[in-house]
Amino acid sequence: MELLRPERLTMNCMNRREFGKRLALTGAAWSAATRGVWAAGKKLELRYIVASSMYGELPLGEILPDVRKTGAEWIDIWPRNHGNQREQMESMGHEAFRTQLTQHQIKLGCLTHYDLGPFRLQAEIKVAGTFKCPLMICGGSGPKGLKGAALKTAVREFAEKMKPHLAVAEENEVSIAIENHANNLIDSPDSLKWLAEMAPSRNLGIALAPYHLPQDTTLLAELIRALGDHMLLFYAWQHGMGCTKKLPKEQELLQMPGRGELSFQPLVEALRQIEYRGFTEIFMHPVPRGIPILPTAQEVTQEVNRSRRYLESFL
């Protein structure tokens, strides 16, 4: 049986007991039969989303036509300094942007806002709600460098502080995913596991970035299995030679799946084992920020597809 896609992903309804409730959605996309597909050992189908920052500050008019070419039907819009497509949305107007999305048969899947952090998202959550955009991503907030009991306490306090923001997210049918960004409260495997355990709402989840973790396939695969359906976005992104200093382009591109040393096969297998339903974003950072990873939109799209073919070789 072919896996069907929903007209709209509601990220807070992804655990097994709630699975059948998706039948009421348009298209009945996530039917009980889908579980039978997995039981029969069918392949994982990754749900790709394209980060606008991969194209630097190129115009949306050049980016949107290429989204479908990458195997995706969703776009993740970034603001400055990584891109400027969020600012482009405002300058053209939301209705004009909505028209462009419809024209190119794609959907707004995520608004990424490291600039705002987790406690200044409420206005943007409402924008996301008007586009039926299911996800927002940011970093965590709190003391850094903690371990053990001190870390667990700080994660609990962070989860408690998120409650009023999650209430707005729930009203707008939006989920907030926290990325394990370096030098952050939420930056280690333990902090991610505790955030998943202590999340006060199904609208709070995790955007997992292997780049910021030890490049150990066993550790990463075990972490994916531990996080399970709390993981709302998976960055297909490895450390390579890093993204903090200018390198020759062939070395900078080692962040991309299939170019660096990290094997994604155990990670893809772990995604299959948890029956992953979140977004997958093929990703890297250029140096300096705000430029495309390659000079033209066509070259960026070709590079994303190169990594996509690598990932799908494990499916």
Image (cartoon, rainbow, N blue to C red):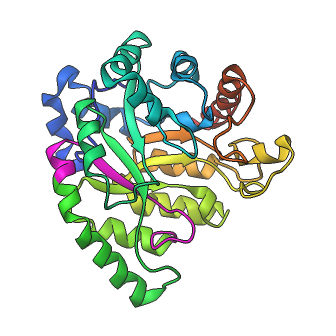
Does residue 47 show up?
no
Q: Is 190 on the left-hand or right-hand side of 36?
A: right
Which residue lies most toward the front here? 91
Q: Residue at x 25, y 53 (%)?
A: 203
Look at the image and tell me in which quarter the C terminus lies. top right
Q: Where in the figure is residue 248, as x and y percent of width and height? A: 87, 45
Q: Residue at x 53, y 34 (%)?
A: 52
Q: Where in the figure is residue 205, as x and y percent of width and height? A: 34, 56
Which residue lies most toward the right here? 248
Instruction: Please tell me which residue lies in front, 194 or 131.
Output: 131
Indicate whether residue 114 is drawn in magenta.
Answer: no
Q: Is 166 on the left-hand or right-hand side of 153?
A: left
Look at the image and tell me in which quarter the N terminus lies. top left
Instruction: Please tell me which residue lies in front, 226 or 254.
Output: 254
Depicted 160 relative to depicted 6: above or below: below
Q: Where in the figure is residue 3, as x and y percent of width and height? A: 37, 25
Query: Magenta residues?
Result: 168-188
Depicted 2 relative to depicted 163: above or below: above
Q: Is 226 on the left-hand or right-hand side of 260?
A: left
| Residue 28: quadrant of the picture | top left
| Residue 59: quadrant of the picture | top right
Which residue lies most toward the top here? 103
Which residue lies most toward the bottom here? 149
Q: Residue at x 56, y 71 (%)?
A: 183
Depicted 30 relative to depicted 290: above or below: above
Indicate whether residue 181 is drawn in magenta.
Answer: yes
